Image: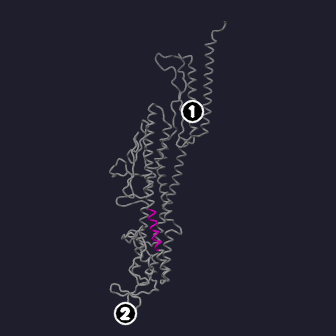
């Protein structure tokens, strides 16, 4: 048989439940603008009814309800949306890194502009045209030397800037790895805090929010796979190995063996098994900076440096070949116009330079054509003997300079050293700029598309997990009314019990 105070107990449970629900509502409102916060909801359930069924139990109209209680405070979170968000954030991080690197490369190339390589090459060809018209002019010869030096300096500058960009991306990579290690340690610490709270049956909702926020950031940085364990902790894997497992966090390190260091697990002392990275900001940095594939170096910047080397080498070799068989004002011949400033046999964008002899004496620029003397050499004022053969030249002859100027439109750039694909210098450089523009445009488009997709997924997630102040205000009023009603029930029950205890049996006294 139920107690006289049974109704008071039901009212008390209702008061506590509505108050707890109001507390949850207050917490939601307070964190409406907190990054990573997930809306919480107090789940109300009826308490076990009275009496409990038994063979010798009370037989009457039926079981009587005993009230309400909060069974759990649940986070309103959709795991599938979390998975989608992390998958798409990984792609967004990749393209953002690519876009950032390509923007810097575009700034280095600086096309189209008056100070770009195209404009400098054009000035060089124009100077050669002017020399062909007036080969006896020292001013025209000096202009050829100066524009040639400007062309070499432009190649040097581009190569240096690209190499510095590689170094800068390497530094960014180390910062990223340090950030990954820091996030992994924080996730491991939160794992243990959550485990200590939830081992008693409670839900560590706010700690889970902090952990999920870190996982979201980590997913954008590097490719990860997240598995939630039965005890509430999570395991974060990278390429099949745990970065975080329970309270343990493994560390990553960046090698320093060459210009394109790989990422390794810290406990890999031999540095023989680089980490396989397939996505995220880290992969975007690596693809832009370059990486070793066997003996070859792949990646956008190494490919661009190789293209610039091919262009510089093609111009230098073709130019030198014609320049060597020409003659300067005083018959100087056999000189290379371009050479490597570091003494290397092969000329590249990084080492191309103008011959110092020509810089010191522009009259040695071979603007004239050497012609073999077929009769008596004594009849010629300008003559030179080469390998037993006498040659002559005309100081006013600019035919060799004209041949040099024609290289602008001559197919002299051999892109694979097989003579199968030849381009003129202008066409090849235009192709380089076109490829850069297309790649940059693709990166911009992919970032824009991914931002739209991630924003849409985030909106879907906010519709589930976000705090709506309007909805919380409605809940606040709803719980307030329920609280007031429960208080009224207790007041009524108190009046009834007071009547029974203090006033009953007083009639006739």
Q: How is the model colour-coded?
A: one colour
Tag 1–tag 2 contact (CB < 8 Å): no
Seen as rendered, the residue at the extreme right is: 508
Identify the residue under disc 2: 376
From this view, report whether residue 201 is shown above or below residue 497. below
Compare residues 217 and 504 and report the one nearer the observer: 217
Picture quarter containing residue 383?
Answer: bottom left
Residue 46, compared with residue 453, is above or below; it is above
Nearer to us in this view, 242 or 434 = 242
Residue at the spot of label 1: 23
Is residue 252 a member of the stretch shown in magenta?
no
Locate residue 491 relative to residue 267 in the image: left or right: right
Which residue is rendered at x = 38% and y = 89% of the image? 373
Mark 2 or mark 1, which is nearer the start of the sequence?
1
The residue at the point 54 percent across, 21 percent down is: 64
Q: Could you tell me residue 451's position as x and y percent?
A: 52, 52
* Main SS category, magenta section: helix
- Residue 68 at what x, y percent from top left? 54, 26
Q: Residues in magenta?
A: 148-162
Per the image, label 1 sits on a secondary structure element best described as helix
Front residue of 102/441: it is: 102
**Label 1 Cα crowd, 10 Å radius (few <14 / some 14-19 / many 20+):** some
**Vertical relation: 263 (above or below) 127:** above
- Look at 47% across and 79% down and name the residue there: 141
Which percent across, then down, holds residue 164?
A: 45, 60
Q: Secondary structure at mark 2?
A: loop
Work out how far the residue at label 1 is from the one at label 2, CA to CA, in angstroms: 114 Å
Q: In the image, residue 92 lies at what x, y percent? A: 49, 52
* Circle on res. 32: none
């Amino acid at each position: 048989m139920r107690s006289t105070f049974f109704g008071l107990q039901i009212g008390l449970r209702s008061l506590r439940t509505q108050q707890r629900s109001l507390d949850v509502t207050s917490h939601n409102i307070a964190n409406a603008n907190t990054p990573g916060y997930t809306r919480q909801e107090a789940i109300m359930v009826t308490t076990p009814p009275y009496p409990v069924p038994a063979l010798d139990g009370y037989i009457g109209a039926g079981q009587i309800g005993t009230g309400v209680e909060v069974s759990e405070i649940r986070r309103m979170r959709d795991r599938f949306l979390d998975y989608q968000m992390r998958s798409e954030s990984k792609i967004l991080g990749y393209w953002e890194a690519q876009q950032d690197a390509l923007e810097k490369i575009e700034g280095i190339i600086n096309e189209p502009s008056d100070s770009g390589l195209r404009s400098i090459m054009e000035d060089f060809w124009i100077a050669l045209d002017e020399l062909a018209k007036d080969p006896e002019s020292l001013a025209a010869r000096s202009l050829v030397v100066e524009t040639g030096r400007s062309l070499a300096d432009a190649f040097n500058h581009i190569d240096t800037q690209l190499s510095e960009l590689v170094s800068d991306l390497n530094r960014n990579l180390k910062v990223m790895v340090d950030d990954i290690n820091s996030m992994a340690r924080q996730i491991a610490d939160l794992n243990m805090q959550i485990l200590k709270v939830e081992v008693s049956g409670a839900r560590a909702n706010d700690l889970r929010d902090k952990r999920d926020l870190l996982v979201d950031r980590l997913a954008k940085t590097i490719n990860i796979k997240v598995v939630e364990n039965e005890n509430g902790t999570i395991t974060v894997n990278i390429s099949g190995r745990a970065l975080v497992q329970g309270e343990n966090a493994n560390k990553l390190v960046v090698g320093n063996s060459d210009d394109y260091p790989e990422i390794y697990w810290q406990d890999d002392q031999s540095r023989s098994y680089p980490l396989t990275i397939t996505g995220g900001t880290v992969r975007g940095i690596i693809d832009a900076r370059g990486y070793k594939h066997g003996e070859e170096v792949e990646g956008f910047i190494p490919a661009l440096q190789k293209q610039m080397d091919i262009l510089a080498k093609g111009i230098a070799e073709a130019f030198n070949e014609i320049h060597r068989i020409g003659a300067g004002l005083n018959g100087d011949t056999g000189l290379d116009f371009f050479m490597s400033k570091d003494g290397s046999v092969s000329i590249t964008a990084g080492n191309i330079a103008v011959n110092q002899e020509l810089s010191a004496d522009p009259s040695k620029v071979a603007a004239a054509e050497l012609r073999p003397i077929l009769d008596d050499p004594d009849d010629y004022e300008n003559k030179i003997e080469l390998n037993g053969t006498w040659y002559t030249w005309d100081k006013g002859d600019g035919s060799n300079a004209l041949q040099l100027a024609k290289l602008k439109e001559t197919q002299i750039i051999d892109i694979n050293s097989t003579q199968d694909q030849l381009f003129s210098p202008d066409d090849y450089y235009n192709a380089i700029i076109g490829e850069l523009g297309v790649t940059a445009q693709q990166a911009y488009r992919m970032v824009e598309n991914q931002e739209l997709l991630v924003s849409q997924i985030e909106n879907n997630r906010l519709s589930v997990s976000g705090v709506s102040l309007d909805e919380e205000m409605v809940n606040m009023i709803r719980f307030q009314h329920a609280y007031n009603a429960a208080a009224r029930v207790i007041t009524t029950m108190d009046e009834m019990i007071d009547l029974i205890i203090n006033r009953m049996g007083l009639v006739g006294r």
